[in-house]
Amino acid sequence: MVQTFDPKSDYKVVGTRPIRHDGLEKVTGRAVYGADVKVPGLIWGEVLRSPHAHARIKSIDTSEAEKAPGVFAVVTNADFPAPRSGEIDTGEDVVNFERDTKNLLAKDKVLYKGHAVAAVAASDRNTALEATKLIKVEYEQLTPVRNVDEAMAADAPILLEDLVGDHLGEDVKDTNVARHFRHEFGDLERGFAESDLVVEETFTLQMVHQGYIEPHNATAIWDESGHVTAWSSTQGMFAVRDQTAGMLRIPESQVTVHPVEIGGGFGGKTKVYLAPVAAMLSKKSNGRPVKMVMDRNSVFEASGPAPGGKITVKMGVSNDGKIKAVHSDLRYEAGAFPGSAIGAGAICVHACYNIPNSRIDGYDVVVNKPKSAAYRAPGSPQAAFAIEQVVDEICDQKGWDKLQFRLDNASTEGTRRGDGVMFGSIGLIETLEAARDSDHWNSPLGEPAPGKLRGRGVASGYWMNGGNKSTVDLMLQDDGSVALNEGSADIGGTRASIAMQAAEVLGLPAEDVHPYIPSTDSIGFTATTGGSRTTYATGYAAWEAANDLIKQMSERAAILWGIDAADVQFDAGRFSSGSDPELSIGFKDLARRIGDTGGPLSATSSVNLAAAGAAYAVNICDLEIDPETGKTDVVRYTAVQDVGTAIHPSYAEGQIQGGAVQGLGWALNEEYFISDDGSMANHTFLDYRMPTSLDMPMIETIMVEVPNPLHPFGVRGVGEVPLAPPLPAAANAVKDAIGKRIVDHPVKPGRIIEALSD
Amino acid sequence: MHPFAYVAPKTVDEAVAVLEKHGERARPIAGGTDLLVQARGGRFDLDAVVDIKKIPELVSIKNDDSGLEFGAAVPCYQLYENPELSAEYPGLMDAASLIGGIQIQSRAGLGGNLCNSTPSGDGICPLIVHYGTAVIAGPSGRRELPVEDFCTGPGRNDLKQGEMLVSLKFPKPSSTFGAAYERFIPRNEMDIAVAGVAASVELDSGGNIAKARVALCAVGPTPILAEAAGAALVGKSADDEAAIEAAGAAAAEAASPISDMRGTVEQRKHLVDVLTKRMVKKAVERARS
């Protein structure tokens, strides 16, 4: 039975903006990131990567490299034990170790340029790098499959010979489509027949990268006792532990992962690329610690970008402004192995609308590109790029107000989501209304510079958010402060947001709760920071543990006063007796007496939350375009979002602003530019055009607070939905400015000139 | 990357001797903003880098009535922070102030940009429209070469084994000279040209264009001096829209771009046309002020 809450609003700590606990270390450069890890006897590992996008490995000869001075070990896929086959439920996650191990180090085929083939451990980084050049690999080159159309063509080269696709329940061999599923309700054909206007459009999207500043890294020791100790910057230390143990085929208890600070993840640091390799190199180097750090090229070519793909949306509306039917067909690039964000994309695509007749087809398609990974609201931005442009087009053709149309068709509690699930308490209406009432929406577009054009776009987006497993330990200190251990990696200010939730319950200032993220051996299992689950689920655990600590302290006060524990109340930082007003003691004074009343106190909470509170966002984007060059400048941007309850408003705003910036980069310029040979041409930050601070205006934020009844403080995850609306908001603004709709991502200057010249 | 020697000679002759000895496996280093990135990226193997910043001639600036000469290792900021130069050599200033950010500009210079010889080098076209000359030293002495003849292909130039760029020389512009450079980039900074155009004009006493040059970047294997574009302007009024249109068309005709991750052939030719017209007008405006 799910507990529900009626969150209040008169908080002491929640909703304030204290300085983050980890701020000083970070701004002074003392924080230890993955590349900073130093242990005695450290040696370096480097990876040899495939020069081809698609090739069969005929042979690998490592003998020259092994003989090179300074080299300790060389590993290939053959050094790894035969993996457990099929989909494995680890109890925490469903993984396919067979494929993960092949992605870690290629076995019989290389499936993308940059695919790791072998690794060398040597006395220093240059020696290791030079030794990789001594490894001889014989390839038989195959035709690269570069996008979903090529992958789904009748005569397509097959990437994975052992793949059995699930096509609407049928097993299919010799296919690049790992999965085709369908969500359907209502009568689609009747819905279209009853429509007065039907708009159908097909959109294409390229892969994009999260672009975190810190490259992937791992340092590992496989010691004489058989125990692996690893340091890695990651969104989930338990995921590193379980994936490493799974690929090395040793028990999880034989792997200890120490999390280090993370220089950006955005979903991309949920997969393991180096830790098991570093461990295997360590084993073959007689237990020397091995450190590995990717360079930027490898991060682009061989980590986990967000899928590109092809999406067709067909929407029918009646003349009274109601959506009658929608069919969305989403084909996502999984990369080299199955498992794109197609499932989430299909959940999100129709989620902003109440649609009586709905069909969603999803395809998970393997192509010769790196295996895709999560990127903030995985799958949702691509889906939004398509459906929100179709909505915009319908409003343009009918002359309807774009926010009113969205309000008239908005999902509310009880609406059926595209995958059939009924919505609980959601705040889409409130978010749309806040956008409609915003200063931005009610301000004119403004005069463009001479010769320029301006346009305004608006779009919505959805993310369901996550719950899952979290653990928090609290330890009462003699000075009345509280140490807080949590299992969640802090990728966006969650040390503060978790500590603040404990502090709220404990009646302490945020500064008196000291958050710490220990190793996997020192805290209960906690799922990866992702799905926008951490402030919600780990915060829930902090709330529960704090309540337990208060209960235990109340019992100590009862001992102190010789009264019944049930008579002790706690309010505003003080314990007092309900019957004797003389008996009252502050939190800190009682903490000093804990030793006299039975000894140290600690509290722990492990939760497993099945449900979460979904989030919606609506963005308004004003662009100025030079029609002669296609140069596009964002001149004003407002992001409106239902945040449930903002625990630390500055960090919630930061998430929203960061999402807008990443989304605008994704919309306007970022793409994996794939050459004819299947390689990524622009694998540097020079040519992978992320926006810089000079490209962005101030991102205005409006936080709507529709508390989530599933959380004691009403928290909804805020970290992912900000990335859903920017793509279509920008594309719709381009249409408004130039009068032409661009359906191929990115909406870059060359495409704008091309559209204008038609 | 292999270990390599770092050599810091005090004279041009010493530097030339080291470069001659190692040939392709030695490179001069000034700011190193291209060289180090390329070496780390595995583009070439080095036995030695020759730091030219300890050679006085390579880091000096001389500006007098005969013109301007600055050493090959003079960093960008020393050009644009000099008010005398920025008034007289506006095209060079456009380039010096837009290459990289402030950190890069304090290391990188126009000499290095020329020697790197990429088709997209922002510094090269402005040198051409300022009628620049490269002063080259080598084992058999010194020679001079017009900048437009310096680059021979992507990343390739006319420097022979043991040769190095010593300085860049420019004639003193007349009081009715104006020049400008602009590139098109999708972002506002920290980006590489999709196409770039530099233009210069010199006006006669009647306000007509007496001399004109248009140079194009990132639209061919080397920076291109579009002579027909300049010719379309000479003898015409500086306000002659038809002449400016003709210059734009001639420049687009002279461009021979490829389609790649940065842009397409059509986009680049179109941009050359647009930017040529804009740069000619800006150069005229500057010539008049």
Image (tube, rainbow, N blue to C red):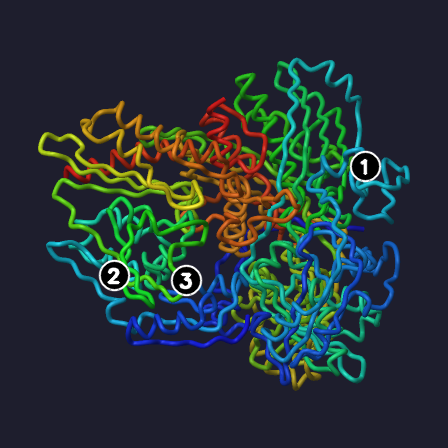
What kind of residue is marked 1?
Answer: Phe
Camera-side residue of A191 and A211: A211
Q: Which quadrant of the view contains residue B136?
A: bottom left
- State the mark number for residue B78: 2
Camera-side residue of A2 and A614: A614
Q: Dot 2, crowdedness within 10 Å: few (<14), some or many (≥20)?
A: some
Q: Which quadrant of the view contains residue A116?
A: bottom right
Q: Are marks 3 and 2 on the same chain?
A: yes
Identify the residue shown where x is 36% and y is 42%: B224
- State the mark number for residue B33: 3
What kind of residue is marked 3?
Answer: Thr
Please state the horizontal and vertical placement of residue A414, each as a whole percent of the image: 73, 34
Q: Are marks 1 and 2 on the same chain?
A: no
What kind of residue is marked 2?
Answer: Gln
Residue A584 visible in image: no
Q: Do the residues labelled 3 and 1 touch (CB within 8 Å)?
A: no
The span from disc 3 to disc 2 (Cα, nearest Å) is 16 Å
Q: Which chain carries label 2?
A: B
Dot 3: element: loop
